[in-house]
Amino acid sequence: MDRGYIFGDGIYEAFLIKNSKFIDFEPHMKRMKRSLDIVNITLPEFSKIEMICNDLLKLNSINSALMYVQITRGELPTREHNMPHSNTPSVIVIAYPEREQTKEWIENGISCMLAQDIRWTRRDIKSLNLLGNVMLKQKASDCGFDDVIFYEKGSLVVTEASSSNVIIIKDDKLITHPVNNYILDGITKNRTIQLAKTIGIETIEKEFIIDDLFTASSVLLTSSGYKIRLCTNIDGRPINDGKICKIGRLLFNTMEKWINE
Ligand code: PDD
């Protein structure tokens, strides 16, 4: 039985290919290599991933997709927790249709629920174990919200959303959680920071709390799937009177342009 199936013993990456352009492919591969190294999985065919992605596009006659690459420690006959000394990893590559934001989301923003972060503390590893994310996202959906934003118990520090990083805009600057084990170092977040810099907007990497969400001029959710989503309502309370601020809109448009050019 595959250890990915039995233990969730594996990692993944998800990245966009838009009109045959691999979006931030190098940082995604670098992060995947890092995740593999941390969990001690050796993948000799690492360099073949780009070729497999291209083959998948060709076979399906498509030029855009949300690519999913999953690597597990592979099959073993017994259920032993110890990692085997050597094993052949299993690799799955899937070309999913790219995720589209609805017109309503783009024009008016999304709504989010707040929930205590119940996940493990190695969120920097892009592990297959997403049960905490899945459970809280489902709870948010059941309550009529588009997504869920997590905060730490006690400190009320905002960490991430179910499958996105969170950036707030305050005093015309971006603020986002520092890179450490409590968040995934998102490639789209980093691209947003870089694009913001090119238009003269500074970013501060520091912890912020729930109250800061409600006093922000915009709350951004960034991910390879949806790129930038603008959140205008949290727990039923409007952010910036429910309006997307100028910088939020500018960043959204700048990202769209960068991806499509
Ligand atoms: N999710 N935080 C979490 C918990 C995530 O699952 C993701 C990505 C991000 C954003 O990372 P990036 O910008 O590198 O995609 C942050 C992917 C898209 C997913 O699981 O579908």
Image: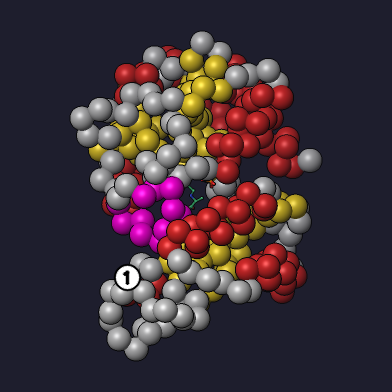
Q: Position of residue 117 (x, y in %)?
A: 28, 41
Which residue is outermost to the left?
154
Residue drawn where x is 45% and y is 71% of the image: 72
Label 1 sits on what residue type? Phe
Mark 1 crowd level (few <14, some 14–19, many ≥20, 10 Å Cα) = some
Task: Point out the residue furthest to the right here.
Answer: 261
**What percent of the width, then of the height, locates residue 163?**
44, 46
125 in relation to 207, above or below: below
Q: 151 or 99: which is nearer to us?
A: 151
Q: Which residues are magenta?
A: 122-132
For image coordinates 57% across by 43% down, the residue present is 187
Q: With respect to residue 40, does 171 lie above or below?
A: above
Residue at point 36%, 56% (across, down): 130
Total number of numbered discs in the rendering: 1
Residue furthest to the bottom in view is: 77
Looking at the image, the residue that sits furthest to the front is 85
Horizontal arrangement in the rendering, residue 259 relative to residue 251 (left or right): right
The residue where tag 1 is placed is 7
In the image, 7: left or right of 200?
left
Would residue 130 be seen by someone viewing this image from the given angle?
Answer: yes
Q: Quadrant of the C terminus?
A: top right
Q: Is mark 1 within 8 Å of ligand 1?
A: no
Which residue occupies 51% across, 22% down?
A: 204
- Is residue 75 inside the magenta stretch? no
Q: Is residue 142 visible?
A: no
What is the image's colouring?
secondary structure
Q: Quadrant of residue 1?
A: bottom left
Residue 82 image position (x, y, % from top left) = 31, 74
Tell me the SS state at disc 1: helix
* Residue 66 location (% of width, % of height): 60, 56
- What predominant SS class does the magenta segment belong to? loop
